[in-house]
Amino acid sequence: MEAIGICIGNTSPIKVNLLSKIPLKLGQFVYIWYKEEGKDRKLLAMVQSVERFNRYINDSINDISKTDLIMDNSDTKVVGTLQILGEIKEIGDSIHLEMLKTPPPPSAKLLRPEKEVLERLFGAKDKRSVRIGRLLSEEEEIPVYIDISQVVLRHLAILAVTGAGKSNTVSVLLEQIANLKGTVVVFDFHGEYTKADFRRDGKKVVNVIEPVFDPTKLPQRDFANLIGIKQNATVQYRYFKRALQEILQFYKDDKGNDWRTLVKTGEFFKQLIYYLESWIEEPEKPPFKGKIREDSLYEVINKIEDTMSDIGHLIQVGAPDLITKIEEGKINVFNFSEIDENIADAIGSNILKHALEDRKRAVRLGSGSLSSDIRLKSPILFIIEEAHILAGANKNTESKNYMTKIAREGRKFGVGLCIVTQRPKGLDKEILSQMNNMIILKLVEPEDQKHVQSASESLSKELMDYLPALNPGEAIIIGNMTKIPLLVKIDKAKGKIQGNDLDVVGSWDKNLEKISDIQELSNL
């Protein structure tokens, strides 16, 4: 096999410098081959950095006309660095990489690896392997597979600027998990997945869930947050909490523990507002010591009324817990496109909390348990779109608390977390650091890059420098799901989603045609 280059300079077990006579690509794989103690040694390495130079055309040249006289391709060399991934070992039908303990010698030859070897290394290993794309820097198509169980057990972050291919990447994952009969929950803030067409055996497997919920089952702080009472509004919260406690106790005493099945939503909120208003109408019987602050009280009443006006169609006393609407073996999409951040936090945290609790019970009772109060009998993956909304670096949300909890202990109970965002620097660093797998598409802003690199030990500076140059659909994949960092072209998802850019010019044209048609009709 013809050599394409050699190792030069000082070598180490993890990195060597290269000299090549042909151009090499960043992320390309090469063999390092040499003989040692009478044995052939073959290492797999990846091009980590690469440069071209010509000794006659250096930084000191100051006359461009002279380059034609001295330019000779034979004088142009390719230099760079290789990251050694390991020594290739074959055991039966499988190939694996064994960590190197001694450095290869300088002058070790660089060879092109066989397609068949790369396919065996990065192809399907077992039923847990799913295709995500193909190697970006190889001339021949080499499919890349990831271990989907590691996505669930070790979590995943998908990071990129807008338009770089986040939605398509998520869709590829969803298609593959659907084919494996896995259970996924998507928090969809833009309605991209509500009309998705993911199928298994020809049947649609998308379960769109409108977040109709019972606020009386929420923790009191979450209920207050839902209607817009901020953490620092202590007086408002005090009034709301007291009124809520009184009304809940009234219905329980009057109608029993099943009162929610007997009381209509409008009646409940009418009674809650009536109780608050009574503190003003009967000032001689205040529920607290001291004078009632009417401005704070009216703020609470107004917020309750505004909430019912804005999202009354999503509020229903007696509604079943949202976790009961999750169907196993399907892609469950919670449509958060019509609600604001406070409401999304209250609903999202409730779903995450109950899912984790349910999976804990399922694991403790055993896989064979048929207990009717367990909804999620198999592992589940949560995909949080626009994760910076619920888990912002400077936000104190209930959702962030439960996302942190799942990131830390979800592995033991089969609850996986996939966070998706175009604003990595706005994401809580602790949560990001718990994502042991990452798919990083194009990132341009330096602060985003620094935030990601500080959260991941596997992301080298050389790979970070490559992020701004990635084209849509190109990504760096790192983590337990692949073992070694890879540059990958993500496959195109088959299932239709609504995340594509609008046809701006086409919309202008159609709108102008409609206006012209209307004007012509009006002139008849």
Image (tube, rainbow, N blue to C red):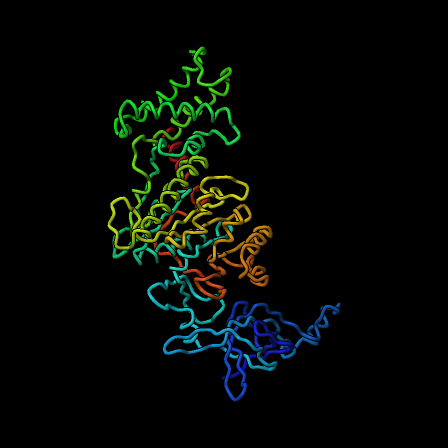
- Horizontal arrangement in the rendering, residue 62 relative to residue 268 (left or right): right
Above or below: residue 173 compared with residue 78:
above
Find residue 232 and report its horizontal and vertical position in percent. 53, 30
Please state, as top left, top right, bottom left or bottom right, where the C terminus lies in the image.
Answer: top left
- Horizontal arrangement in the rendering, residue 455 relative to residue 378 (left or right): right
Find residue 125 and report its horizontal and vertical position in percent. 37, 68
State how many labels appear: 0
Above or below: residue 4 compared with residue 482:
below
Residue 318, picture quadrant: top left
Query: Which of the pair 192/420 is nearer the observer?
Result: 420
Q: Residue at x 30, y 23 (%)?
A: 253
Find residue 281 and report its horizontal and vertical position in percent. 42, 11
- Horizontal arrangement in the rendering, residue 364 relative to residue 459 (left or right): left
Residue 274, picture quadrant: top left
Residue 225, picture quadrant: top left
Query: Which of the pair 264/407 is nearer the observer?
Result: 407
Q: Residue at x 24, y 50 (%)?
A: 370
Find residue 82 and report its horizontal and vertical position in percent. 57, 72
